[in-house]
């Protein structure tokens, strides 16, 4: 290098040497920078090289913290095993696997040189579940919705799900403001109680229903077509004021149906939105509708492909005519009627297809009813399914068609009604039709669900006459599954008792002839307040046999024969030999004396029945008429002719409204005459009586002729001989019913009208059926009895002598006593007192009275009220609240009555 430089310096000029020197200096100066750059590149390369990871091999896996679960069980939930490589990702997967089991509230994993330790905290076990704050929905409705249960493992996710279910349950009842807060109560041994604190909140009502787009009909008219109602004061008892999405969808269909019946064929509901107010207490519903144009019927015709039906004749009988406003409901009804008509001719699968042609230019709708060709159908087989107790023949004999007969839709419907009327099966029973082995064959299936036919009824009531009344009956309406009825009834009150055993067979020897028999014993005692005056007892023991034959599908004739022994008695002290001829005279009231004695009664009767009800248990449509005639005198010593009639009609008004009207009446005439003044030819025990339970709003025997003994009172209301007579109201206040005697009547009439009002779904599920009712009736027509008036005059009972019977007093006004110190009674015929001394009886001041006859009037009595039927958990319950609108003086009214029973 030096030699080369020296040579260059020697051969080159100075400038060249200068340039070379500068270049050499630059090179020497750049060498440190190059060295630094090389060091930086080496350092960067060293950083980008991946570090060497030391592999951890799992040597062992241990579990810590387990209480109930075995370690091996916990290890079975994870994928990590000894001998495998342990990484952070593997540890995370272990956590995920264990948390997924929902058995643990906390899990951690540690690795110490291949020794893995899994530490767990187990979820507690549920001890019990407690509901607090729920009043509107009871525990038995909420508990089935809760998936958690005692002895299960607690998890937060399950609690959240149960909270959502409870809230949804409240939403179904319209309580959208309901909140549920779960609380945990820690117990020993890692157990917890779960407490659901429920805040039910108010029921979310429908505050407003808005309708947008309607021009032909007002908002109020359209709201009237909806099931959903706005919450107002007068809709307090309605359940339709709460929000229900299903009900909202139904209301859209209701609006469409309404418009289609008014001719608006293009009507549609654009939207229906329910908005919850911020306070979650009310909903505002908005319907947006498009009405479209209104159409009329154009050409209407029938095109029949069945040979039994003439197209022109059927066209002439169509219910709609060209030019009428279009009505889709009328079209549907016509299709149904034509289908039923075809069914009556044996075409079970006949199809009626209405074809519509819309004419927008003329705004008319042409309708052509096409009756498709079909084969005549025959009943191949009748199957009875679902009966476990009831014999097949009990169901089959109610069918109005037989196997092999031509199909008849009217006969099928009648068969359904007859089977329903048995009362043995479900209310919604229907006969289903199934295709048979050939196109012209059909199978009828009676898929029945048996329900309890045994009845155990207990009734209780309170009467101002009879005090507490108890009655019970046990009846089996499907005895041994043969359709027979066996019953036993017992009634008891302070003044009446009865017992009856009955049996009936609707089909004797499997023939359409019914027979039945009753054996009974009845007792009646009018000793209302344990007084002997005006008291009598009546006892009847006998039997009735009956037989019935059908005259047509809806009419039957029933004959009956009754024989009974009757004994009407009064106390021995009410008979006295008044004229010394050795014959004891009755000293009681005339209307009682005429009935005293023992008799045998032989009655021959006949009843003509007409019944077209769809159900005898709970009818909704149809009518019933009954006329009964009875002749007493075929043997025995009582003779009379008695007629009774009854009719009823039920109307299904739709929407659950059932309206019924019933009327009945009776008349009796004696066939033997009694010429004694004041004695009625018809005995007291043979007359009609009216009141509870037939005539609601009146007490037992509370309507019709009655004799009431009214006292003479002074100005202070005390008994006196003054001629001021107490009023019937004053008499009622004394409750001295011993001197209030119902005489009955020889004729009566009674009419009842009742409207059953449907409630919401909740009330229907509870079996509550309220009703409004009106009763009109009267009881009348007796011969006026002789009446006493003391002291104005003494009644002459015998030989023209005045008679007084009652407590005896001495001249000082002290009551006469017997040897035991008890007051004695007697009459003006008594000559001596109890000690044999001369007796001068003095009348008791309370004995100053006048007997007055009330209520013998044909004028109607009218009552109205509210009745509630409830299928309660302890049996059918009925309560009636009554208001008397019109009555006659002397009638005995009653405001409330009820009865209760059960079924088995």
Image: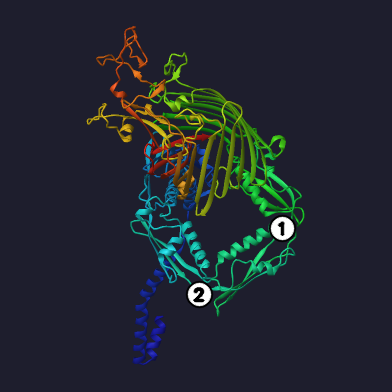
- The answer to whether one can see residue 266 in this image is yes
- Relative placement, left or right, of 806 versus 315 is left
User: How far, Cα to Cα, is label 2 from label 1?
Assistant: 40 Å
- What residue is disc 1 on? 345
**Kind of element beneath mark 1:** loop
- The answer to whether one can see residue 118 in this image is no
User: Which quadrant of the figure has residue 644?
Assistant: top right
597 or 306, which lies in front? 597
Quarter of the image with the N terminus in it = bottom left
573 or 229, which lies in front? 573
- Relative placement, left or right, of 830 versus 656 is left
* Label 1 environment density (alpha carbons within 10 Å; few <14, some 14–19, many ≥20): some
Q: Residue furthest left?
A: 716
Pinpoint residue 66: horizontal percent, then vertical percent: 46, 38
Residue 293: mark: 2
Q: Is residue 164 above or below residue 18?
A: above
* Label 2 environment density (alpha carbons within 10 Å; few <14, some 14–19, many ≥20): few
Pinpoint residue 20: horizontal percent, then vertical percent: 37, 86
Tell me which label, 2 or 1, sits earlier in the chain. Answer: 2
């Amino acid at each position: 290098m030096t030699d080369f430089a020296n040579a260059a310096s020697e051969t080159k000029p100075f400038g060249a040497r200068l340039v070379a020197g500068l270049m050499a200096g630059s090179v020497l100066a750049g060498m440190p920078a190059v060295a630094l750059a090389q060091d930086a590149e080496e350092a960067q390369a060293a950083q980008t090289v991946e570090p060497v990871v030391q592999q951890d091999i799992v040597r062992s896996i241990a579990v810590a913290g387990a209480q109930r679960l075995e370690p091996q069980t916990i290890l079975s939930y994870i994928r990590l095993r000894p001998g495998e490589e342990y990484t952070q990702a593997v540890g995370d997967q272990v956590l995920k696997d264990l948390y997924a089991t929902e058995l643990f509230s906390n899990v951690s994993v540690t690795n110490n040189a291949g020794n893995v330790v899994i530490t767990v905290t187990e979820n507690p076990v549920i001890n019990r579940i407690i509901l607090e704050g729920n009043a509107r929905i009871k525990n038995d409705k909420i508990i089935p919705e809760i998936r958690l249960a005692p002895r299960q493992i607690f998890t937060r996710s399950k609690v959240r799900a149960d909270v959502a279910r409870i809230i949804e349950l409240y939403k179904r009842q319209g309580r959208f403001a309901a909140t549920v807060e779960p609380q945990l109560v820690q117990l020993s041994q890692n157990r917890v109680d779960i407490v659901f604190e429920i805040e039910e909140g108010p029921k979310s009502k429908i505050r407003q229903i808005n309708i947008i787009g309607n021009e032909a009909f007002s908002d109020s008219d359209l709201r009237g077509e909806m099931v959903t109602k706005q919450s107002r004061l007068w809709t307090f008892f309605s359940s339709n004021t709460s929000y229900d999405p299903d009900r909202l969808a139904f209301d859209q269909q209701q609006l469409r149906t309404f418009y289609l019946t008014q001719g608006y064929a293009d009507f549609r509901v654009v939207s229906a939105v329910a908005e919850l107010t911020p306070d979650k207490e009310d909903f505002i519903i908005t319907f947006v509708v498009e009405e479209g144009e209104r159409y009329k019927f154009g050409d209407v015709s029938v095109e029949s492909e069945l040979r039994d039906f003439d197209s022109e004749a059927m066209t002439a009988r169509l219910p709609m005519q060209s030019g009428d406003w279009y009505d889709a409901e009328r079209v549907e009804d016509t299709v149904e009627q034509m289908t039923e008509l075809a069914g009556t001719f044996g075409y079970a699968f006949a199809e009626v297809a209405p074809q519509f042609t819309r004419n927008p230019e003329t705004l008319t709708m042409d309708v052509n009813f096409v009756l498709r060709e079909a084969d005549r159908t025959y009943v191949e087989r009748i199957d009875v399914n679902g009966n476990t107790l009831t014999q097949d023949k009990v169901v089959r004999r109610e069918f109005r068609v037989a196997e092999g007969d031509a199909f008849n839709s009217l006969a099928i419907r009648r068969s359904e009604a007859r089977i329903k009327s048995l009362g043995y099966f479900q209310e919604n029973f229907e006969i289903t039709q199934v295709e048979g082995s050939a196109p012209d064959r059909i199978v009828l299936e009676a898929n029945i669900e048996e329900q309890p036919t045994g009845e155990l009824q207990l009734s209780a009531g309170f009467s101002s006459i009879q005090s507490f009344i108890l009655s019970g009956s046990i009846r089996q309406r499907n005895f041994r599954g043969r359709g027979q009825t066996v019953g036993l009834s017992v009634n008891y009150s302070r003044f009446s008792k009865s017992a009856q055993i009955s049996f009936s067979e609707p089909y004797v020897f499997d023939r359409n002839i019914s027979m039945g028999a009753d054996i009974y014993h009845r007792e009646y005692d009018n000793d209302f307040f344990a007084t002997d005056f005006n008291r009598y007892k009546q006892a009847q023991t006998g039997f009735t046999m009956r037989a019935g034959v059908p005259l047509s599908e809806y009419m039957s004739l029933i004959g009956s024969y009754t024989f009974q022994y009757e004994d009407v008695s009064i106390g021995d002290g009410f008979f006295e030999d008044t004229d010394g001829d050795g014959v004891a005279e009755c000293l009681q009231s005339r209307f009682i004396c005429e009935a005293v004695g023992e008799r045998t009664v032989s009655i021959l009767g006949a009843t003509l029945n007409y019944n077209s009800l769809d159900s005898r248990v709970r009818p909704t449509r149809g009518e019933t008429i009954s006329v009964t005639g009875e002749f007493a005198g075929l043997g025995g010593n009582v003779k009379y002719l008695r007629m009774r009639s009854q009719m009823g009609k039920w109307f299904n008004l739709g929407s659950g409204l059932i309206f019924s009207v019933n009327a009945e009446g009776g008349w009796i005439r004696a066939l033997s005459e009694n010429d004694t003044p004041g004695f009625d030819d018809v005995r007291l025990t043979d007359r009609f009586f009216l009141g509870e339970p037939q005539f609601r709003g009146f007490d037992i025997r509370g309507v019709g002729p009655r004799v009431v003994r009214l006292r003479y009172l002074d100005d202070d209301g005390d008994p006196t001989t003054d001629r001021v007579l107490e009023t019937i109201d004053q008499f009622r206040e004394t409750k001295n019913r011993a001197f209030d005697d119902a005489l009955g009547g020889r004729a009566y009439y009674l009419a009842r009208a009742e409207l059953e009002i449907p409630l919401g779904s909740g009330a229907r599920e509870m079996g509550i059926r309220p009703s409004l009712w009106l009763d009109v009736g009267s009881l009348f027509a007796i011969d006026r009895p002789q009446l006493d008036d003391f002291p104005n005059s003494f009644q002459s009972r015998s030989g023209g002598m005045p008679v007084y019977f009652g407590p005896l007093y001495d001249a000082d006004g002290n009551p006469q006593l017997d040897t035991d110190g008890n007051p004695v009674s007697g009459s003006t015929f008594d000559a001596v007192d109890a000690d044999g001394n001369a007796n001068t009886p003095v009348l008791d001041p309370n004995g100053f009275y006048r007997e007055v006859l009330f209520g013998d009037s044909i004028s109607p009595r009218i009552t109205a009220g509210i009745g509630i039927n409830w299928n309660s958990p302890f049996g059918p319950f009925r309560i009636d609240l009554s208001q008397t609108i019109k009555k006659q003086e002397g009638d005995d009214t009653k405001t409330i009555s009820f009865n209760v029973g059960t079924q088995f």
